[in-house]
Image: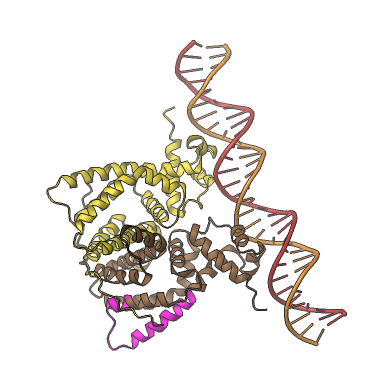
Chain colours: A brown, B yellow, C red, D orange
Amino acid sequence: MAQSDTVTRILDTAEALFAERGFAETSLRTITGKARVNLAAVNYHFGSKKALIQAVFARYLDPFCAHFNAALDELETQQQAPDLETLLTTLAKTTLSVPASKGSLSVFMRLLGLAYTQAQGHMRRYLQDHYGDTFVRFVHLFREATQELPEAERFWRMHFMLGSVVFTMSSLDALKDMAAADLNEKTRVQDIVQRLVPFLAEGMRADPVDTALFTADA
Amino acid sequence: MAQSDTVTRILDTAEALFAERGFAETSLRTITGKARVNLAAVNYHFGSKKALIQAVFARYLDPFCAHFNAALDELETQQQAPDLETLLTTLAKTTLSVPASKGSLSVFMRLLGLAYTQAQGHMRRYLQDHYGDTFVRFVHLFREATQELPEAERFWRMHFMLGSVVFTMSSLDALKDMAAADLNEKTRVQDIVQRLVPFLAEGMRADPVDTALFTADA
DNA sequence: TATTGTTTGAAACATTCGTTTAACTGGGGG
DNA sequence: CCCCCAGTTAAACGAATGTTTCAAACAATA
């Protein structure tokens, strides 16, 4: 019984290795070898490599969405719609509050970034199918907090935001080292997230770009 | 003779396919097949797949750095140091003015992102050795354009910016698809870059964050 | 203890990959 | 004319991959 820890060991190892080198570059033999588990265990417990990748995401995203939905519930009971800073801070707090199994935030963020660039179709589709509703809920609140923005402008700026977050959190370790070297300062994750909020909120408030003043010169 | 266009066809096809699905996911057989070239041609003309990847990037980065260095020369002759928008717009214009930047832009950005988070071995070394000086030059000008920022704040915001750019450009294809689905609109790269500039510049101008008001609640 | 369903183990299978080999082609000088 | 050599071609090689197989080990139940 107890769903022996084979499954857990596979998930832990796969999560770390995927984040380190990507999906295609991480073989099942590397995973099962490092996890001290038989090669066939992956296909037995998960069915395929694709399914393993999705399981790695689900283990983090399921509790995250639970927390986040609860936070959104509370925001929606409020009299007036939350403003930008409130919304971003809520997202930040939720992110930090998720126990993050073991491999912490940066690992998952790296995975999320990879899911955007690699894995052509299936990963994006999986994320959309399983967690799209929560995302849509957030977007709805976000839209109310940025009513002055044209639809297209908001769409792109939301992804600019996502980029800042994903990239920064992905490179957390490297950036912390650089911060310790360049400026003599130890930085906690909370500090970085705290710095992110005004940067993103202010970027959102920038005047939408007027029409093309880009020349095609050399 | 005329160095038959085999080399060019390989570079063109590889560039497009790398941008589409990444490096490990793109096989030499796919490249040579689509380019209607013999499989052995890659190893004959370039030596290896690694060398082909480097050649694809060199074809983009060599003219890019030439253009960008020229632009930086001009900025440095100016009486006073360029402001934020000027600096970012210069970078954007240079990026777009490079002829080969149709598909290879996202490839380069993806690699830049990978070089930041992980080693990626040979590619990071190659980039640093060949194009590091130009990057350092830009960073220097950027510091002068944001003198009002505390050192730490600028450090982190520069990486927030880098994250927006790298992530957005890395995921260009995915984002374009989503933009076409969510809002019925075909988006050109120029439009995105143009939207990025005010977003980033305004984020840079946000008031530096005061002291901690984050609670550690659940 | 005997039986059942689940999990693990070592090995094999079928593909696919990057790379190498060797034979062939078509011209341009000796 | 012959040789040479850059360029191309088809075929094969060796290694690595995801997946499947089937017997053994295990846990729980009757």
In this rendering, position of residue A19 left or right of residue C2: left
Q: Position of residue B170 (x, y in %)?
A: 38, 57
Asked if residue A150 is positioned above or below residue B49 in the image, the reply reads below
Magenta segment: A61-88
- State the quadrant of the C terminus of chain A: top left
- Is residue A62 one of those drawn in magenta? yes
Q: Position of residue B155 (x, y in %)?
A: 29, 60
Q: Position of residue B161 (x, y in %)?
A: 30, 60
Q: Nearer the viewer, residue B1 or B65?
A: B65
Kindly identify the residue that appears in the image at 35 percent across and 49 percent down.
Answer: B102
Kindly identify the residue that appears in the image at 25 percent across and 75 percent down.
Answer: A147
In this rendering, position of residue A154 left or right of residue A125: left
Q: Position of residue D21 (x, y in %)?
A: 74, 62
- Is residue B124 one of those drawn in magenta? no
Q: Magenta stretch: dominant SS?
A: helix
Count of numbered marks: 0
- State the quadrant of the N terminus of chain A: bottom right
The residue positioned farthest toward the left in the image shown: B79
Q: Nearer the viewer, residue A171 or D28?
A: A171
Kindly identify the residue that appears in the image at 61 percent across and 71 percent down.
Answer: A7
Kindly identify the residue that appears in the image at 35 percent across and 75 percent down.
Answer: A139
Q: Nearer the viewer, residue A189 or A213?
A: A189
